[in-house]
């Protein structure tokens, strides 16, 4: 059995407005809306999932829109950036595309040999595109508005900002099975599983940084992949051994999850690859209606009334 996590499963962030989030991630970044549902712990809030064609683990960025809530603050004890993988030749395309949509972006930078474009969405969410020289099997969502050769293929990595490198490193390496693979200045890189895009976590060591505040425009939690329930059970024991408080297994309909806060303060989740997003909608129909889990279906009318109205993206064939 594989011992460590396989890589990144999903990242969940907080936004201000469901419609603006839908528009930014589908129309500008060209991700597919794969699920529109509610936060199972707060059914008056949407939970919006974006990903590739069927939301393969490692491609899924999700949002809780919290209208009227204050902006968060990026800082230590937080996941501060979500990075997506694109072909290295696609950097100029994305510079033009983002600029033409009014997204301001920093000049491209080199990081571990790759070219990185950093930008933010309308809420200040920290996003990056990494021009990756590896040949990838992943294609991303190729029926969206971005030509297929330039499509976002899925996650490249997530960056954590930490005051004490060692205590978060020990959770990644000793508990979750990541391997340290490099350092550039105060950035330390770790890989899990196959060690390709989608399995990478960077820790930026910032000993004197202010603590972050999780709210609009910040990341809520980072989820890692367990291959199945047995693997998750094994990882749960490892987390307990590290003296971390971990939840029991929770059924999230599309996966089963456990949650714990790593020593530096970031909320981590370990989620199963199964059953996936096609459990309640066919691949063609993903994200075309409000999906509710069986235990909330009887309250559909009431839930629909309490949610802000949104216009869902139309499928565009490039
Ligand atoms: Zn999650």
Image (spheres, grey):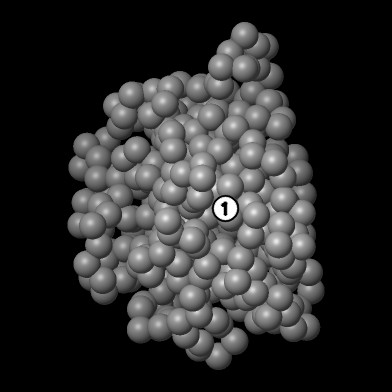
**Residue 184, image x, y percentages:** 50, 88
Q: Residue furthest bottom?
A: 185
For the question of whether residue 95 can be seen, the reply is no
Q: Quarter of the image for the N terminus: give it.
A: bottom left
Give the left or right position of residue 224, taking residue 284 as reference.
right
Q: Residue at x 45, y 67 (%)?
A: 192
Q: 17 above or below 294?
A: below
Number of disc labels: 1
Does dot 1 land on a helix, a strand or a loop? helix
Pick whichever, 218 or 266, lies toward us: 266
Asked whether residue 6 appears in the rendered view, the answer is yes
Near-viewer residue (194 or 314)? 194
Q: Residue beneath label 1, please?
A: 234
Q: Quadrant of the C terminus?
A: top left
Along the viewing direction, whichever of 227 and 292 lies nearer the viewer: 227
26 left or right, relative to 257? left
Q: Position of residue 276 (x, y in %)?
A: 42, 35
User: In which image quadrant can residue 249 be found?
Assistant: top right
Query: Residue 123: horizontal and vertical position, in percent?
Result: 62, 53
Residue farthest to the front, as pictured: 1
Q: Does the beta carbon of the residue at mark 1 sit less than 8 Å from ligand 1?
A: no
Q: Residue at x 71, y 65 (%)?
A: 242
Up the image or down, 255 lies above or below 299; here it is: below
Give how far across and how far down residue 194 sits, in percent.
36, 66
Dot 1 alpha-carbon crowd within 10 angstroms: few under 14, some 14 to 19, many 20 or more? few
**Which of 66 and 1 lies nearest the eye of the viewer?**
1
Q: Residue at x 56, y 82 (%)?
A: 187
Q: Residue at x 31, y 40 (%)?
A: 53
């Amino acid at each position: 059995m594989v011992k460590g996590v396989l890589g990144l499963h999903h990242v969940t962030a907080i936004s201000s407005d469901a419609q603006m989030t839908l528009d930014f991630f589908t129309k500008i970044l060209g991700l597919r809306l794969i699920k529109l549902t509610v936060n199972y712990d707060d059914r008056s809030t949407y939970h919006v999932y974006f990903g590739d064609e069927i939301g393969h683990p490692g491609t899924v960025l999700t949002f809780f829109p919290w209208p009227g809530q204050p902006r968060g603050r990026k800082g230590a004890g937080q996941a501060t950036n979500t990075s997506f993988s694109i072909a290295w030749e696609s950097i100029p395309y994305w510079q033009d595309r983002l600029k033409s949509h009014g997204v301001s972006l920093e000049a491209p930078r080199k990081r571990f040999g790759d070219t990185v474009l950093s930008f933010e969405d309308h809420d200040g969410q920290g996003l990056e595109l990494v021009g990756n020289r590896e040949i990838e099997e992943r294609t991303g969502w190729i029926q969206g508005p971005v030509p297929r050769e330039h499509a976002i293929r899925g996650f490249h990595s997530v960056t954590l900002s930490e005051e004490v490198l060692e205590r978060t490193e020990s959770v990644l390496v000793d508990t979750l099975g990541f391997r340290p693979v490099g350092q550039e200045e105060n950035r330390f890189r770790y890989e899990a599983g196959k060690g390709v895009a989608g399995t990478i976590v960077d820790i930026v060591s910032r000993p004197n940084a202010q603590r972050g505040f999780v709210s609009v425009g910040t990341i809520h939690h980072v989820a890692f992949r367990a291959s199945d329930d047995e693997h998750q059970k094994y990882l749960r024991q490892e987390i307990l051994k590290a003296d971390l408080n971990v939840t029991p297994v929770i059924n999230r309909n599309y996966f089963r999850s456990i949650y714990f806060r790593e020593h530096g303060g970031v909320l981590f989740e370990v989620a199963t690859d199964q059953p996936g997003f096609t459990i309640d909608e066919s691949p063609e129909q993903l994200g075309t209606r409000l999906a509710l889990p069986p235990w909330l279906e009887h309250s559909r009318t009431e839930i629909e009334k309490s949610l802000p109205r949104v216009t869902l993206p139309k499928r565009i064939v490039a």
